[in-house]
Amino acid sequence: MKLYWKMPDGLKVHYHQELKDYEKEIAKGNLQAAWRHLERAHILGQPWPREHSHVHWIMLEFGLRIKDIREIVGQIPRLVVGGVKSFVGTIPVGNTGGANAPPLRPMEIPEDLQAILKPYRSIQ
């Protein structure tokens, strides 16, 4: 069993950019665009416990911000279990992380993120 702890620096740059883009969009009130950046950050960060859990925390905050009970309730188990699944390398690759996505279902990764992830494929 391979354990995952530290996100590679080259990938971390893209992960943090998605979170910055989320902040920019949320500040402008563009909720759909902001959420899309959170989903993308989730796809990039899900193999690593810290980054994976951090995105779920922000998704929970987003749910609270927009008063979406489904998202709030959906993020709680993801916060509890997501980081553990990352640590032991059993994530559903490509899953976008929101309450609208079944938590164990692998999903298609957008092409641009596939290109970013390509050098790290042994991780995925």
Image (tube, grey):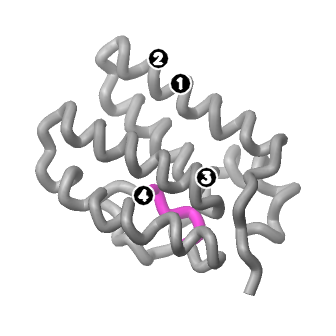
Separation (CA) of disc 2 from disc 3: 19 Å
Residue 68 screen position, x and y as percent: 14, 44
Taking the spot 55% from the left edge, 44% from the top edge, the residue there is: 41
Q: Residue furthest top?
A: 28
Are there few (<14), some (14-19), or many (20+) residues within 10 Å of tag 4?
many
Are there few (<14), some (14-19), or many (20+) residues within 10 Å of tag 2?
some
SS assignment for the magenta stretch, majority = loop
Residue that carries the numbered disc 2 in the rendered image: 24
Closer to the chain start, of discs 1 and 4, is 1
User: Please, what secondary structure does the residue beneath circle 1 have?
Assistant: helix
Residue that carries the numbered disc 1 in the rendered image: 21
Identify the disc placed on residue 2. none
Q: Verify whether residue 123 appears in magenta.
A: no
In the picture provided, is 85 more to the left or to the right than 26? right
Residue 83 screen position, x and y as percent: 51, 64
In the picture provided, is 5 more to the left or to the right than 97? right
Are there few (<14), some (14-19), or many (20+) residues within 10 Å of tag 1?
some
Separation (CA) of disc 3 from disc 1: 15 Å
Closer to the chain start, of discs 3 and 1, is 1
The magenta segment:
92-96
Q: Verify whether residue 94 appears in magenta.
A: yes
Residue situated in front as seen by the camera: 62 or 76: 76
Do residues under tags 3 and 1 come within 8 Å of each other at their CB atoms? no
User: Please, what secondary structure does the residue beneath circle 2 have?
Assistant: helix
Identify the disc placed on residue 97. 4
Closer to the chain start, of discs 3 and 4, is 3
User: Please, what secondary structure does the residue beneath circle 4 have?
Assistant: loop
